[in-house]
Image (cartoon, rainbow, N blue to C red):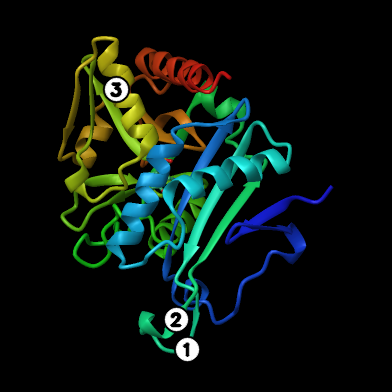
Amino acid sequence: MSLKVSINGKLFDKADAKISVYDHGLLYGDGVFEGLRSYNGKVFRLEDHIDRLYASARAIHLEIPMARSELAEAVVETLKVNDLTDAYIRLVVTRGAGSLGLDPRRTSDPQVIIITDTISLYPDELYEHGLKIITSGTIRNHPAALNPRIKSLNYLNNILAKIEGTNAGCLEALMLNHQGHVAECTGDNIFIVLKGVIHTPSVDSGILEGITRQAVIDLAREIGLTVIERTMDRHDIYTADECFLTGTAAEVIPVIDCDARPIGDGHPGPITKDLHHRFHALVRGETRS
Ligand code: PMP
């Protein structure tokens, strides 16, 4: 059976799920998106993702032609039709087809797309042994140019950094902000552990407010750990006891090396491992039917 993709509430076979080449999502990256996951047939933090999608849309002056509840239901329905329980879900809202000019007033019909598919994950051994990362020369978007809090369809900034990472043999790359402070990785937020305390760049460091990031902060605080959101420098990463990344696809993954400097003893640390297991249990617990 072919996978079904939902466009504006209608289901299409994957091969027939198409939008116009005049869509400003394609022509200009004019649109917003979300990446979600389902476990045991239930979507993790669906409302938070929907909230972030609508906030991104509002920030770019795009009205999503669907109520939040309708969109949430359409996500669940698309998963069900595709008989997917453990899936990756991509929500995309484009500005819609228009003329060959920037003006969004000359577009009509924003397209609301829901793709549900199997998820591609980092290999297990990376969770066991940890990731190596490098700092990319490409900085994160200046918040006054395109605020990283907006999950826009224009991901070139992150893609350029990702290319630098993969060229250096690393699956993730660290991105600094316009002030030279640590922001985040190309598709994940970053955390360190120093003397038992967790630190992560604050939202004003120019990051996407990751939903996994928030879940891990809450989880750490619940078990009595201190979490500090602050301005961070590469020095903090190089001298940390532990480092890990968070994201919907990655969950919690250890980082053991940054710019060829081993972090801590060069192995995933105990707090990282503990949070990885706790997050794993949390998502499966929250989504237990
Ligand atoms: N930062 C960036 C730039 C991202 O694209 C993502 C999502 N892939 C994240 C952080 C992590 O966010 P979340 O935990 O909501 O997936």
Q: Residue at x 75, y 50 (%)?
A: 3
**Circles 1 and 2: CB atoms closer than 8 Å:** yes
**Going by the image, does 60 lie left or right of 7?**
left
Q: Residue at x 48, y 20 (%)?
A: 286
Cα separation, mark 3 vs mark 2, equals 41 Å
Q: Residue at x 35, y 27 (%)?
A: 215
Task: Where is residue 146? Give x, y as percent.
Answer: 28, 64
Query: In the depicted view, which residue is nearer to us: 232 or 214?
Result: 214
For this rendering, which residue is in front, 147 or 288?
A: 288
Of the numbered discs 1 and 3, the one sitting upstream in the chain is 1
Amino acid type, mark 3: Asp
Q: Which mark is residue 269?
A: none
The residue carrying mark 2 is: 107
Q: Amino acid at mark 1?
A: Ser
Tell me which corner region of the image, top left, top right, bottom left or bottom right, holds residue 42.
top right
Image region (quadrant) for ligand 1: top left
**Which residue was labeled with disc 3?**
218
Query: In the depicted view, which residue is nearer to us: 187 or 69?
Result: 69
For label 1, the SS is loop
Query: Which residue is located at x 48 percent, y 58 percent?
Result: 163
Confirm if mark 1 falls within 8 A of ligand 1. Answer: no
Q: Nearer the viewer, residue 126 or 85?
A: 85
